[in-house]
Image: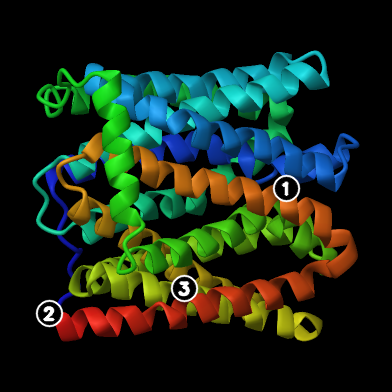
Amino acid sequence: MMFSLPKIEKITRDVALSHFLLMSGYKLYSFYFPIYLVAESFSLAQVGYANFLIYLPIAIFAPIAGFLNHKINPAVLSSLSIFGYGVHALGMIVFPNIFIFYLFQIILGISAALFFVSSRAILMSSQLENYDRSFAWFYSADLYAAALSPALGALVIWKFGFLGVFALALFLQFFNAIFCYFRLKNQTNHLPDSVKIKESSQNYLKVLEVIKNKNILPFILVSFLVLVFGGFNNTFFALFLKSLGWSLNHILVFNSVLSLIFLPISFWVIKMVAKLKSERNVSWGGQIAGASSILLGGLINVLNFYLVFFIVLGKYIGGLMAGSGRSGLLSVKLKDKPEESAAIDTVFAPLATALGSVIGGLIIASLGYSLIFIFGGILIFGAGLFSKFPFAKINKIR
């Protein structure tokens, strides 16, 4: 039987492609950012704070972005947010002091809130055949960008320094902003409505009431834990590999090969995600991500390129399943409130990532990478396993 790609609707394709271009521009330099900051005499805690100031504003601004999606075409908001990423790249060239540096991290966070709320609102409000599958395409776009951008970024940094890579990122984000506007505007003209601030606030309360349901909350919590640990990895994993004695070139090859290999595997994961219920995607995703983390910490003394490769591959698979399941679950349960649902869904990822970044920066020195991976993995695996029990009850009711 010939290999075939999972199905993808036109609007899912355009939103995912815009996400891919956005992450391609950002990942030209973001993968090296922690190493760059440490080389610039930033402490590990300050590296954590920098990421905290990116992700916390996403969580704070997401509800505002949700309301703006009632008033302004989300394609317009997405385009503006992409340009904000370009402003961040420009800011990394011109910032004169630490205060301005942190200010640009906040600008990036606000831009990310606009993009991810608007993109999720577009998908959640569309008539999609399978929401889990569409969000799997959307989330995997980030991993596809990771396959190529860090390698290109390294080449540019080697040739022109960070000034060159920031300039290239600015150009790519400007192009993507134009692409997003013209590809999505006509498909989303119907989405803005006349909802007032008071009504939107009431919608948020209704959304939270739905999420608090015992048949939904456990799966949200599992996904949240996966994201917290993902935030730790996003910030410190390159430094972890350096602690194993890996060179920057070694880390670059590892990241590029991993992302390239994961690309065809992700197609299989997307097909599997489409066949499972959202709850089961979250549950299995948490268990896979947790088990992978336990192995990474437990085998730290014997880790080599191949072991790390297969373990992190498992974490990628688990994270994609858990994230797609969470967004798919919220899309189905909150179909009549896509803007508020998109905002709440967007809050989970940055809030968890911010917590993972800042907590990791504070406890690495005392616990070390091994214990953090083991304890975090046990917590995630246990949460994923426990969430199965209410899911089994749901099946009996059905």
Residue tagged 1: 358
Question: Which amino acid type is marked by label 2?
Answer: Arg
The answer to whether residue 279 is left or right of residue 293 is left
Disc 2, disc 3: CB below 8 Å? no
Residue tagged 3: 286
Disc 2, disc 1: CB below 8 Å? no
Type of colouring:
rainbow
Whether residue 380 is situated above or below residue 228 in the rendered picture: below
Q: 184 or 27: nearer the eye?
A: 184
Q: Earlier in the sequence, mark 3 or mark 1?
A: 3
Image quadrant assignment for residue 179 = top left
Q: How far across and down, in percent of the image, does residue 366 sit?
A: 89, 64
Which quarter of the rendered picture does the N terminus lie within?
A: bottom left
In space, the residues marked 2 and 1 are separated at their CA atoms by: 42 Å
In space, the residues marked 3 and 1 are separated at their CA atoms by: 22 Å
Q: How far across and down, in percent of the image, does residue 267 sit?
A: 29, 66
Q: Secondary structure at mark 2?
A: loop
- Single out the mark in the foreground, 2 or 1: 2
Residue 132 shows up from this direction: yes
Residue at the image point whose x is 52% and y is 58% from the top: 227
Q: Secondary structure at mark 3?
A: helix
Q: Earlier in the sequence, mark 2 or mark 1?
A: 1
Residue 17 shows up from this direction: no
Q: How far across and down, in percent of the image, does residue 360 sit?
A: 74, 56
Residue at the image point whose x is 8% and y is 46% from the top: 127
Residue tagged 2: 398
In space, the residues marked 2 and 3 are separated at their CA atoms by: 24 Å
